[in-house]
Amino acid sequence: MLPTESATRDGRPLVLRRATAEDAEALVAAVDAVSRERAYLLRSRFHQPIEDEREFLARAAEEGRLVLLADVEGRLAGWVTLGRPRQDYRRHCAELGIGVLAEWRGLGVGRALMEVAIAWSAAQGLERLELGVRASNHRAQRLYERLGFVEEGRARRAVKDEDGRYDDVIAMARFL
């Protein structure tokens, strides 16, 4: 299943692959870049030390997590993470997080990441995928809905940006 090769909407080669410890620095920089935009992720900054991220990535597969990277022309374009909750009664679920760098949005990178993450989850015997999305992120919501996710709840004013504006967080899930 991995790595997977396809193309972006504008025809550039797109490779989806598991992250390795060697990807730590690029991944931390990418997550921080998207976080600083304050419009997409549910955090404002990503302060993970590089060595901690290396260790996290080195252990991911053996701990049942997926950290999937999208490379376009050898450059990191986005990522998706899937992690299982620690509670035994929730081991049939996975929590999904995704990010796409600004220059690669609208080119099918997010959809490609999501499709592979969904297929991987089904192959692992998972039954339910969960995610949270800012209410103002309509593009992501539409993608998730097209991929079978449904809104299950809303945390009102759950995010407060540095400028004092609030945003709701929508809980979405999909059964596999």
Image: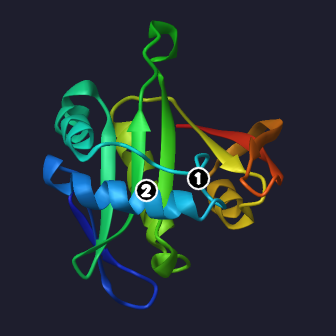
Examine the rendered structure and indicate whether residue 67 appears above or below residue 16.
above
Task: Report whether residue 18 is seen.
Answer: no
Q: Which mark is residue 97?
A: none
In the rendered image, which quarter is residue 143 located in? bottom right
Residue occupying image coordinates x 66% and y 61%? 39
Task: Report whether residue 148 is seen.
Answer: yes
Direction from residue 86 to residue 16 in the image, left or right: left
Q: Which residue is mark 1?
A: 41
Q: Which residue is mark 2?
A: 31
Between 71 and 34, the one lying in front of the other is 34
Marks 1 and 2 in Cβ contact (< 8 Å): yes
Neighbourhood count class around disc 1 (C-alpha, 10 Å): few under 14, some 14–19, many 20 upward: many
Between 148 and 53, the one lying in front of the other is 53
In the rendered image, residue 100, in percent from the top left (x then y), is placed at 48, 66
Q: At numbered mark 2, what does the secondary structure look like: helix, strand or loop? A: helix
Q: How many marks?
A: 2
Direction from residue 24 to residue 47 in the image, left or right: right
Alpha-carbon distance for marks 1 and 2?
9 Å
Direction from residue 155 to residue 35 in the image, left or right: left
Residue occupying image coordinates x 72% and y 44%? 150
Q: Residue furthest bottom?
A: 10
Callout 1, which amino acid?
Leu
